[in-house]
């Protein structure tokens, strides 16, 4: 009887153990199945959203200043003109990096983690961050206000981007700018240019200035800075060596335009801008771009991608034709007048 009782107990224990193990196995399987179902539901929901014509995009803007703000406004207008209207069939997550490239990287990674339908990057550092974050995904990057997208390695070429990335380039009309400065300052010999050493678009544009300056009998005096804290000290030296300053679209320098203008005015030399907002804020004049129009064209390109076109096959559009904007009050302050050849083709910046 004792042996039979022992065998019976062993049998019961074995059965119980098997039951427990079987239950654990089913629990694991249930969790996996549930997770897979949730993932499948998310994908289905995303597909349903796209099929329904509703999209969510992210806009990453490097800094808050006039030209980049105009790009963003134009971008949204361009999308709307193509049927993608915010708060109707389009949700926009707008983030500003406040001039910090590390913030731009965090913003880009957040956009990608949320699997947005598309990201728009305004200015080169933001474009590079979004492009890098989107690698290995099917999220297209559409950039604007990038002077040299090839040098920034965002595209293989302007004609054939090759990557899931395209947009518009704000290549500055450097020769038009030099010609305008020569007409306004016939006795000038030197032009000062301040740039940020980590901004590839600034380095590229600076090289264009240096290449073309001799054609107009100018010498370019460059001053490289690594951060905003370097700008006041660098300016103290630069203003003693030049007859004027020509500002580029360098985001770090533009964010500190008040300092540039104050130091230059104290030294008695004018600052020429690179777009209308800089002239509004105190530069004497500029052969500048229309950044609202630049953004609008970028929005139309983004709309084409949302409609199904392959971003890698859409050529980068370069907008480089400038218009003369003047600030008459500042011009008068420095004894500058509008040359005869420009009197019928300028706009007062207001």
Image (tube, rainbow, N blue to C red):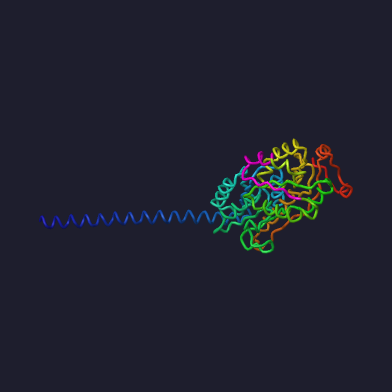
Q: In this view, does 71 lie to the left or right of 350?
A: left
Q: Does the magenta stretch include residue 221?
A: yes
The C terminus, quarter of image: top right
Where does residue 158 sit, x and y in percent of width and height? Answer: 68, 61
Residue occupying the point 56% across, 57% down? 135
Q: Which of 305 and 274 is in front in this view?
A: 274
- Which image quadrant for residue 175? bottom right
Name the one closer to the observer, 88 or 216: 216
| Residue 32 seen in render | yes
- Residue 149: x and y in percent read 66, 56
Query: In this image, 234 relative to 28: left or right?
Result: right
**First to last magenta residue range:** 219-236
Q: In which quarter of the image is the N terminus?
A: bottom left
Residue 200 location, x and y as percent? 64, 53
Q: Is residue 286 above or below residue 165?
A: above
Question: Quick one: 207 or 252, which is closer to the camera?
Answer: 207
303 in magenta: no
Would residue 91 be visible to someone looking at this image?
no
Q: In which quarter of the image is residue 160?
A: bottom right
Report whether 40 appears left or right of 93: left
Residue for point 55% across, 50% down? 109
Q: With respect to residue 319, does 239 lie above or below?
A: above
Q: Place residue 131 in its image quadrant.
A: bottom right
How many numbered marks, from 0 up?
A: 0
In percent of width and height, residue 66 lies at 71, 43
């Amino acid at each position: 009887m004792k042996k039979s009782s022992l065998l019976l107990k062993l049998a019961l224990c074995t059965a119980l153990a098997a039951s427990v193990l079987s239950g654990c196995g089913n629990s694991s399987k249930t969790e996996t199945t549930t997770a897979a179902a949730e993932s499948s539901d998310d994908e289905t929901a995303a597909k349903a959203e796209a099929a329904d014509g509703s999209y969510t995009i992210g806009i990453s803007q490097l800094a808050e200043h006039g030209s980049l703000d105009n790009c963003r406004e134009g971008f949204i207008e361009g999308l709307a003109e193509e049927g993608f209207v915010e708060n109707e069939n389009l949700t926009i997550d707008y983030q500003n990096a406040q001039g910090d490239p590390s913030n731009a990287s965090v913003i880009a990674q957040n956009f990608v983690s949320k699997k947005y339908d598309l990201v728009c990057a305004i200015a080169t550092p933001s474009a590079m961050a979004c492009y890098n974050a989107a690698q290995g995904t099917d999220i297209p990057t559409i950039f604007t206000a990038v002077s040299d997208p090839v040098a920034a390695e965002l595209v293989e070429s302007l004609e054939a981007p090759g990557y899931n990335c395209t947009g518009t380039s704000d290549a500055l009309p450097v020769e038009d700018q030099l010609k305008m400065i020569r007409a306004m300052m016939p006795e000038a010999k030197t032009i000062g240019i301040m740039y940020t050493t980590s901004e590839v678009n600034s380095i590229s544009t600076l090289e264009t200035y240096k290449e073309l300056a001799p054609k107009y009998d100018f010498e370019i005096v460059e001053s490289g800075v690594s951060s905003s804290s370097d700008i006041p000290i660098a300016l103290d030296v630069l203003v003693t060596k030049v007859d004027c300053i020509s500002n580029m679209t360098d985001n770090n320098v533009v964010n500190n335009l008040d300092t540039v203008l104050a130091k230059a005015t104290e030294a008695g030399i004018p600052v020429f801008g690179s777009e209308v907002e800089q002239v509004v804020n105190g530069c004497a004049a500029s052969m500048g771009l229309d950044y609202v129009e630049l953004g609008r064209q970028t929005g139309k390109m983004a709309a084409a991608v949302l409609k199904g076109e392959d971003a890698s096959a859409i050529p980068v559009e370069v907008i480089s034709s400038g218009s003369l904007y003047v600030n008459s009050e500042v011009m008068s302050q420095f004894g500058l007048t509008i040359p005869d050849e420009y009197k019928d083709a300028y706009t007062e910046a207001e």
